[in-house]
Amino acid sequence: MTQHPILENLNPPQHEAVSHTEGPLMVLAGAGSGKTRVLTRRLAWIIHSLRVAPEEILAVTFTNKAAREMRERVQEMLGLEGASASHRFWIGTFHGMSARILRQFGDRLGYGRDFTILDTSDQERMFKRICDEKSFQDKYWTPKRLTHSIGRWKDDGIRPDDLTEEQIYKEWERNAISDIYNSYQLALRQANAMDFGDLLLNCLILWQQEPEIMAHFQNRFRYVLVDEYQDTNAIQYRWIQALAASHRNLCVVGDDDQSIYSWRGARVENILGFKDDFPDTKVIRLEQNYRSTSNILKAASGLIRHNSGRMEKTLWTEAADGDMVNLYTAEDAEDEARFIASEIDSLCPTGDYGSAAILVRTARQTRSLEEGLMRKAIPYQVVGGLRFLDRAEVRDALAYLRIVASDRDDVAFERIINTPKRGLGDTAIKNIRQMAAQEQVSLFEAARLAADNNVMRSGAARKGLRSLIELVDAAREMLAEKDPHKVLNYLIDKSGYKEYLHGLDNGDDKLENLDELHSALGRTESLTLFLEETALATDLQNEETDKSRVVISTLHAAKGLEFPWVFLTGMEEELMPHKLAITEGEAGLEEERRLAYVGITRAKQRLYITIARRRWFFNKPAYPIPSRFLKELPGEVIEDRGFKLRARRGASGSLAGMPGGGPSAAAARRGGKSPRFPCR
């Protein structure tokens, strides 16, 4: 019997995961097991076989890139081409889908449908202003700390009046921060803005206050699919549970062995406890790996097997054993870098350096590695550097566009009011803020009142304020008739910003970035949609990598990527596992083990693990011992590249200094007594 093309080329567990459509389903998808294929085929199969409309399925991912690729693949499989078909799909991130819901019903909570979404930088500026207004100064509770902590509280569903001793122990401190949190929420409402945490929390508040809206979406989404379920936090968990409570056709896909984001609120308990939430859950394990060699998978499985809080699964492959896992013991970080650079130079004779990746536990490890690559003239890129959207000139241009789109966007107005300089100093801005508070209007409207009533004493300030208001008004009229990228050109030119950039040493580079922003605007459907997409383009997105450059990445940023050759560096105690994780006990160690597992499973053909006998921290030497994780790797897949070096010095190989693995090289030189390693 001929199968439908949607079901072709699937292994038995994949086939079952795609075709099992009714009731709660958990797909445990090991690394490299074809998870994306299963998700897209399942979505397409439900639409095709059950005659379900695309609008009746909600598919949630963790990155916009993953959502876009899923939508494009499903459209291609079903022959649904064009933008009109694309808009029928509810495929996106938690934040993107929440924003879409709130665009429709946010007015029920007192927000305009054109609300602005603030990013981290915007939040910090708002907290700084609030702290200044309250004369609140604290070395610990900086605007950055407030942004992070309140974001985490929102992820846990905690509102200002919900703070307890668990969040802040001292009562006076708790009252002060609760007051700032309250003022922040009022300022957001005044600016018709939400931050990332608000998007999901406000959805839940909306559904609690308006049960008929909750019922509307429960009935609308007959099927719910969630990717990377192991990375969900408390508020995302409640959001999913609410939507799936009625029909219970909930499919979650994830891998508890790759849950590595607890520091930003992810709870591995969500996936481990899924069967408790839905006792009749069908569990399907995807264990066949299509990425790595057998030896790499043996190393990964041998390591992760030591975690007790996991759901049993064992990766396997039809591929050959492949190369052994290379373990190299370096004299120091510089020797480690020389070895890695030399190996990459040998592996990439034709210059295909993008096939190699160097993975680090912390960003501080990259300096010596970068220097080693530079000495060999090997091009590289550091994943996780300054994003395009975080560049000052791009943020300035976006702020101009935001105030054109919404005159209630106080954060955007504060950014552009004196950028470039137009004679509006701190006193002028303070006067505008006072007028906004008195008249209960936005800063932009207060500025208009100030200009109309000649409130500004300085002639330069009056002139600068009028020119800014006239610029924004003209751009707003222009937007009704012309494309957004033409409005951007007008704003950058007439505001004097282009001339200002020309005067900077690196002005040409900054202008090129604005050209790139201009090109992106030319491809958008509307300014509102573009601004929402840029606001939702979080740092969780995997960056596009240059195929001609070696990738240097932290382990956290490398999740979802794969490379033929991977160098896993610094496999040492207090680095991997990290010293902070060690203090957290077994839970911290298990997450660090999962992190090492993620690093190992990025490798397709060859894996290198490196350790160093000496490193420098804060200008002091440290003598790390090999990570306990090395002892957990099956010895039959390890090739000790440091053996000869150690043998000349009287030790017994790279594994000699490992906990339980015999005396270290340093101990051998000191007569067999282990040294006391300084704390980092």
Image: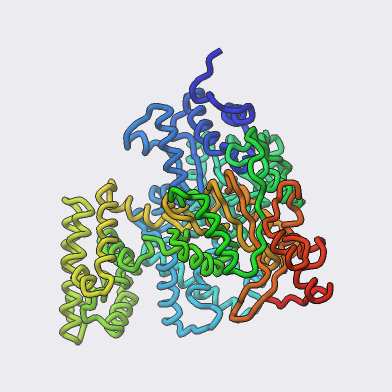
**Residue 107 falls left or right of residue 624:** left
Judge by depth and name the residue closer to the eye, 535 or 607. Answer: 607
Residue furthest bottom as drawn: 457
Q: Is residue 458 visible?
A: yes
Judge by depth and name the residue closer to the eye, 595 or 109. Answer: 595
In percent of the image, x 72 and y 67: which residue is there? 625
**Residue 221 falls left or right of residue 391:** right
Residue 656 drawn at (x, y percent): 77, 62
* Image vertical order of residue 177 relative to residue 549, above or below: below
Name the colouring of the figure.
rainbow
Judge by depth and name the residue closer to the eye, 51 or 263. Answer: 263
* Image vertical order of residue 615 relative to residue 62, above or below: below
Q: Is residue 24 visible?
A: no
**Rendering quarter of residue 297:** top right
Judge by depth and name the residue closer to the eye, 447 or 50. Answer: 50
**Residue 489 falls left or right of residue 239:** left
In percent of the image, x 21 and y 75: which residue is there? 503
In percent of the image, x 50 and y 25: which residue is there? 6
* Image vertical order of residue 470 relative to residue 605, above or below: below
Residue 65 drawn at (x, y percent): 44, 47
